[in-house]
Image (spheres, rainbow, N blue to C red):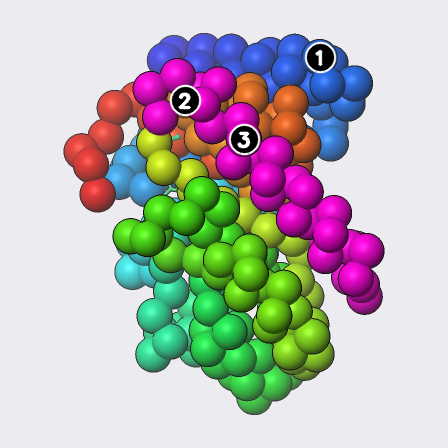
Amino acid sequence: MYIQDQLEEIRSAIAAAATRAGRTADSITLLAVSKTFPVSDIMQAYADGQRIFGENRLQEAMEKMPQLPRDCEWHLIGPLQRNKVRKALEQGFALIQAVDSLKLASAISRIAGELGKTVRILLEVNIDGESSKHGFTPAQLETEWETLTALPGLDIRGLMCIPAPVENPEEARPAFAALRHLAEQLRKRGPLPLPELSMGMSHDFSVAVEEGATIVRVGSAIFGKREYR
Ligand SMILES: *Cc1c(COP(=O)(O)O)cnc(C)c1O
């Protein structure tokens, strides 16, 4: 079965990269990015033991999530509009990965308060200065850190990045290293332990693991080629 074979291969590659970096494979979470793929494909991954899935569009996630077994864990990895925050929080994602501005973090904090929830998030960093990209610049994050960490109702678990696509996965290494360094700086400032670094996709997850990724977001390498969106 294609999906199960791919999953096995990726798990081995993650374990190998972890070993090269002196880490253990269980310190890395494989997030299966199921956007654009049907529930039947997700069920194949589920049958092979995969439980953690990522979707980048709220609407699509809301359609799929009720069709999958309850023990799946879902991450929202795409941009979230402020007027959709309430819907997203009610949906019960385990992690909202792409919180890309103080305004969005504040909106999540406020609605988390109204719903009596604590919401796990990652802060998205525009680590390589791609002006077209979402995310805090490292400088913004440093400036807004006190404000962000004081927001109630948020459990800021770490950082994520989506560097510009590169031909050779090695070219992504500096961006991954930069995200790790930034997290180290912010940990020193406190007060958060920031355990998670979400970085690396199908093409470059091995390099990301070598540079400290704790979550790799892998779509097409598991499920096959998708229509771009
Ligand atoms: C689509 C997507 C991925 C997965 O990309 P692949 O190259 O298919 O592995 C990872 N992260 C985000 C934010 C995405 O939107």
Please give the range of residues in magenta: 166-194
Instruction: Say which amino acid is labelled 2.
Output: His
Instruction: Say which amino acid is labelled 3.
Output: Pro
Q: Where is residue 157 shown, x and y percent of the image?
A: 67, 56
Q: Is mark 2 within 8 Å of ligand 1?
A: yes
Name the residue that disc number 2 marks: 203
Of helix, strand and loop, which one carries label 2? Answer: loop
Q: Which mark is residue 174?
A: 3
Residue visible at 41% across and 48% down in the picture: 129
Q: Residues within 10 Å of mark 1 (few under 14, many from 20)?
A: few
Q: Answer with mark 1 or mark 2, whichever residue precedes in sequence.
A: 1
Q: Which mark is residue 20?
A: 1
Rounded to the nearest angstrom, the CA distance separating label 1 from label 2 is: 18 Å
The answer to whether 178 appears left or right of 38 in the picture is: right
**Circles 3 and 2: CB distance less than 8 Å?**
no
In the rendered picture of this protein, how many numbered marks are placed on residues?
3
**Circles 1 and 2: CB distance less than 8 Å?**
no
